[in-house]
Image (cartoon, rainbow, N blue to C red):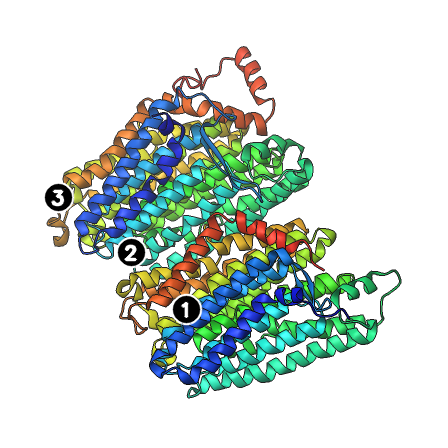
Amino acid sequence: MTPVQALDFIRVLPEIVLASCAILVMVAEPFVSARHTAALAWVSLIGIVAAGAGNAWMRRFSGPAFGGSIAADPFASYFVYLLLLAAALTLLGSVRYLETNQVHHGEFYALLLLGTTGACLMVAATELIMIFIGLEISSISTYILAGFRRADKRSNEACLKYFLLGSFATAFLLYGIAFIYGLTGTTNLVQLSEKLSAPGARPPLLWIALILAFVGLGFKVSTVPFHIWTPDVYQGAPAPVTAFLSVAPKAAAFAVILRVFLGGLASAGALVFWLLWISALLTMCLGNLAALWQTNIKRLLAYSAIAHAGYVLVGMAAAKAAGPEAGEGIASVLFYLAAYALMNVAAFILVAHLAGAGERYQEADDCTGLAYQRPGVAACLTLLLVSLSGFPATAGFFAKFYVFRAAIHAHLIGLTLVAVLNSVVAVYYYLRVVVAMYMREGNPRASASPLPWPLGAALALSLVGIFYLGLFPTPFVRLANLAASPLP
Amino acid sequence: MNFFHTHVLSIVLFFPLAGLIPLLFIPGENKNALRWWANIVFLADFLLALLLVFWFGKEPAQEGLFKFVEKHTWIPSIGAQYHLGIDGISFLLIMLTLVLGFLSVLSSWTAIQERVKEYYAMFLLLQVGMLGVFMSLDFFLFYVFWEVMLVPMYFIIGVWGGPRKLYAAIKFFLYTLAGSVLMLLGILTLYFRYHRDTGVYTFNLLDLMQHANSWPLELQFWVFWAFMIGFAIKVPMFPFHTWLPDAHVEAPTAGSVILAGVLLKMGTYGFIRFSLPLLPQASSNPKVVKIMVTLSIIAIIYGALVSLMQRDMKKLIAYSSVSHLGFCTLGIFALNPHGLSGSVIQQINHGISTGALFLIVGLIYERRHTREIAELGGLSNVMPVYATLFMIVMLSSIGLPLLNGFIGEFTILQGAFEVNWRWAAWAVVGIVLGAAYLLWLYQRTMFGPCDNPKNQVLKDLNLREAMTLIPLILWAFWIGLYPKPFFKVLEQPVTAIVERVNPGFGTQQAVSQAGVPSPVSEVTGGRGE
């Protein structure tokens, strides 16, 4: 065991900044009067920005930390940015939401920051136990966040469901890790990869370990058939929390899947490929088909989030199928997740606003005629939905295109065909909300109050990002490729 | 001027988008200001494009036969470029788009009273998409415009449409989208094949074309069918046409004009621009040709028969589009210069005639709020100007000599006849039926006693309304009387395409022309001199 050095701490700078900021918020909370709770939000936002700056500064110190359990590499750095972005947008979207719902407590921000910290640890971890710790930090914070509206039955249901099923899933993951350790004698991904790729070293029960670990992570990214909790939790949790839930833990879990299944356990070829292939197929199809029947916008977006996980898995299957040239597939996954983060967080925080106090108006029909009361809000939601459905000039299109390109390149023609047809089906349910807003006569029940400025800023940022990624994706593609290249 | 000259396509393309920004700042209550502004933008864009008419002949071809080429890197990581350029075929279609765009916006002046700002905003966006489709020489860029265009059209049908607008809009949207994603897979297949052959990723149409002949037949077949579904839905060819009547009937008048006049042409344009040159062996395969021609002939006759049965004027014209577009696809798959150039001319003709017919239906709908043929009758007594203009338009659609329809249909038949006289014979049935349903429509609505009291008080057209039709009628006469400039513009690109799909055709033709004087070359006005 190498002794801990200062460099080790620099390599986890974003996590340190986030955790300290979370503690600061928690300590300060009792001393801040109820009217000024918003100040804690700004402190948290500064923390997030500082973590981002730390992440940028850290780039010149990249390398393994804490005896190889953490890696500060471009891959981690990319995901940390992504997670910080999701956290920042969520934060901007939740300030007024918490006020109108009278749950404006400083703990919210502390938990949000801790959830982000956990997710950041997950993406940087190159050691299975570290991954588990990160996962737990992130999960426990989000369990509480899901039940943040204590007085609300649905929020409680969401919390309990998320907690029970989530714990169950982590148990699976842990079980898988135990198996891997038992079979190979290590939990370090780099060593694992070396041991497994050595000639003749194929432990007989590795497939059980693989499946167990995949089930555990599959829960987190809500792949079918481990998605059962998703619609209820996404619908019941406070909408800004859903925004965060649908992006940060999911992106982090995808990062872990990439690191573990395409990095550490990469030599366990065919089984991993088929696991990815089958879950991609099922996740896309079931997510989209189930979404077709939803009228509740939150639930609809929950199923859409499941379907998007399916497209991401297509990219992963492509990366796996491409063998040594996995970089293209991985880059497409990374790009997709960035686009997804922008669209999904923005959509959920906008829905949080529209649903009004107590989130009473979540149905698509509640938005009837919104376009003529609040043209700006309706146009904004339309653009987000158009991007989610993958129309050109938006990030959603280029992300899908990039994934499909990788998949065709890896000769996954059948899977790609299913994916493109799915994206056609998806348009139908995304348009349901647009139809209500623009094409039906009536007065909207949804909140027609003007957008609070933090939410407006978050939406503006997302929309600019969406069009930037859609029209000029080159810098981001380069970033994603850079991050994808050195996967352990 | 030099900058203007080299970037003329971009300027024409994005002018409506630039016009959109001031439009968004005009307050929504000020409807007349919105109308004036939108009309001015469309007219100005058309006038800008008129420069193209003057420059086009003199401009030297830069890449292949393409002129006014603009090429910039866009997304280098995937090899997509911002690459514009036009040849004779796209030039004509762009002019059609600009004319119909302006006229349809002009025709909406009184028809649209609700949500005026959004309406014009959608039309401006739609215009950008349509122009972009015809200008793109990069497959990725093309696809972006092709898809982007769907959204405004969806809104135009869904917001300002008739009673079943929601159903029609979503049907239009999903059908077209399903076709285009399959096309995307085809595009990607070619893209990767090109990469395998050369090690370069590119969506550049001209580069892909250079390699087209080396692609194995099987690959070409797969891609051909992927493209074919995408384009055939757009055309729409039988049996992919079922979205069309719904969309046309429910769309507002201007939407129908654009839908019929321009959007349907994108399918046929796709065949000409992409399927034929990129997949020459597959497109000229006898089996493929047989299938495509059979579907075209079915569309011609079926569309005409269904038109005969219609009681709703707009639906009648919608089905007549299926029939007319059948001629266009028949001409394309005759794979000879007559067929192809006839097809392009017929596409323009269809845009003119059917666009005008939809305007005519819109004018009566605005007055009577019905399109039922049985509700009308004897209108020539109360609306003489309207009846006269309607008659000219109707005759042009039927294909009466001296008017545009004749030139297009005749040239297509000539092309079809050169390959197989049976094709021409079947297609002629469609022409006869076409005359029947249109004349019958005219007779039922315009002639006879005007005994419905509601019809007796109808006002004739005002100047603005007449002006929406007159430019189209003038254009119809121009093509009908002096089609030579149109054929001349088409000659080079059409020959080049025929040369690709039907290698050696030109030499055969030269031999046969030297031996036996071609009896048909006189009729088309000395084309190709």
Q: Are marks 1 and 3 on the same chain?
A: no
Residue furthest to the right in view is: A200
Mark 2 residue type: Trp
CA distance for labels 2 and 1: 36 Å
Residue in view at x 58 percent, y 75 percent: A138
Q: Which residue is mark 3?
A: B382
Q: Which residue is mark 2?
A: B160
Residue under mark 1: which chain is it in? A
Q: Which secondary structure, mark 2?
A: helix
Above or below A110: residue B156: above
Mark 1 residue type: Leu
Q: Are marks 2 and 1 on the same chain?
A: no
Residue under mark 3: which chain is it in? B
Q: On the rendered structure, is A467 left or right of A274?
A: left
Of badges 2 and 3, the one in the foreground is 2
Label 1, residues with CA under 10 Å away: few <14, some 14-19, many ≥20? many
CA distance for labels 1 and 3: 64 Å
Residue A92 disc label: 1
Residue in view at x 27 percent, y 40 percent: B41
Label 3, residues with CA under 10 Å away: few <14, some 14-19, many ≥20? some
Residue A202 visible? The answer is: yes
Image quadrant occupied by the C terminus of chain A: bottom right
